[in-house]
Amino acid sequence: MVSYKLCILKLLENMENIKKLLEEVAKISNEYAEELDKTGERFNMFGICGVDHYENTHTKIIKEFLDPLGSHGLKHRLLKCFVETVGISDFNCENASVSHQTKISPRSQLDILIEDEQKKYAIIVENKIYDEGNHEEQLKKYAEDAAKNYQKHYLFYLTLDGKDAFEQNKENEFYMSISHEKTMINWLEKCIVITEHHPIVRETIKQYINHLKQLTNQDMDTKNKEEIHNAICNNLLYAEKVYTEYFNAIENLSYKFKEDVKKKLLSRKVISNETVIEMTEPNAKYSSIWIQTKFKETIGIENFNGNGHENGNLFIGLLDFNRSKREEKYKHTFWIGVTIETIWTKKELFEKLQNYANSDEKGKDSIIYELVLRIDDYIKNIYHFLS
């Protein structure tokens, strides 16, 4: 009996310590959020305009910053800074030209092409925001065609986290991986100094840096990170317990939320009958709802648990599992790229899930209704697109 009581007391003590740890982290996060509200740093036109997953839009933004003829009016200074940041020392930036979506052969259309004045040297950037495919053959073609067109070229593979397109042989490296997370933010932060006397350009660069930090989960400053790290280090045993159950808790909560969304879609007649809507099972690789349209296309709503494509954002789009539309550009194997829309960023999704978990039935229903309206609007628009 004594042993049983001691176990209960120990369990209660553990729960109390876990609660204190979570409260301490929440306090730090809330203080940081209040600071952002005071300074206006939450405001970001790139996020408002939904730039997140549109690779071509990101490419255009980067190209404009790099272009000596760009509207920033700084000539080749931003380009020179980029060239130095990626470790190139033999490229003459004066009078260089920068273009995007440029063909150097029938099979090679480059995201960003930087050429020197004599068009003997080239820097190529292949930009992939949310990339999960193997681009070995594509990059090899770019390298082969660039070798035919230029005396010397540099080929960079740009992703959010700088991961390789595939494992290269060290004796035969033909591209270099760079990241938005480090390389581009590092370059743009240097550009802030260069644009000191160009306030509109400077503030635009700052907003783009903040946007990239949000996409790469770096939007908390060093001081707040250190405070959270200290809180965790002072409670390592309890932090481990939280970490162990974190993903299970998210999965259980998101599945319940997904069930309620499905019920609401049916009760409001957004979906005509239960036979055209499916849900992935708990702990599936992607937490999704699939809706079969009257055109036999599939609408997907994905990442109810914040873990998957599009950087964990909750998004909606059309899927073509047969990949029958040759003219379309596919993303993540089966998704038709131009139809993808972000509903909530990962951060917004978790805020909604948290509010859903802590709300009464009326509050839960309000959050679900908000999402169902977005889905309903999308379905109406996509029917117009398909017809």
Image (cartoon, rainbow, N blue to C red):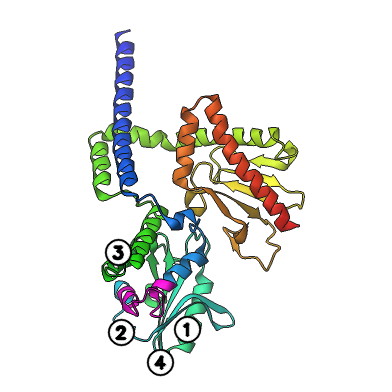
Residue under label 4: 118
Identify which residue, 281 or 69, lies in the foreground.
69
* Dots 4, 3 in contact, CB < 8 A: no
Question: Which amino acid is tagged 1?
Answer: Ala
10 Å crowding of disc 4: few (<14), some (14-19), many (20+): few
Q: Nearer the viewer, mark 2 or mark 3?
A: 3
Q: Which of marks 1 and 2 is nearer the N terminus?
A: 2
User: Which quadrant would the C terminus be assigned to in this image?
Assistant: bottom right
Q: Which mark is residue 90?
A: 2
Q: Of discs 1 and 2, which sits in the foreground?
A: 2
Mark 1 residue crowding within 10 angstroms, few (<14) / some (14–19) / many (20+): many
Do the numbered discs 2 and 3 sit on residues whose CB atoms are within 8 Å?
no
Front: mark 1 or 3:
3
Determine which residue is flagged by label 1: 146
Q: Give the range drawn in magenta.
A: 64-82
What percent of the width, then of the height, locates residue 243?
37, 37
Q: Position of residue 354 (x, y in %)?
A: 45, 34
Residue named by callout 3: 189
Question: In the displayed structure, does residue 72 sit left or right of residue 196?
Answer: right
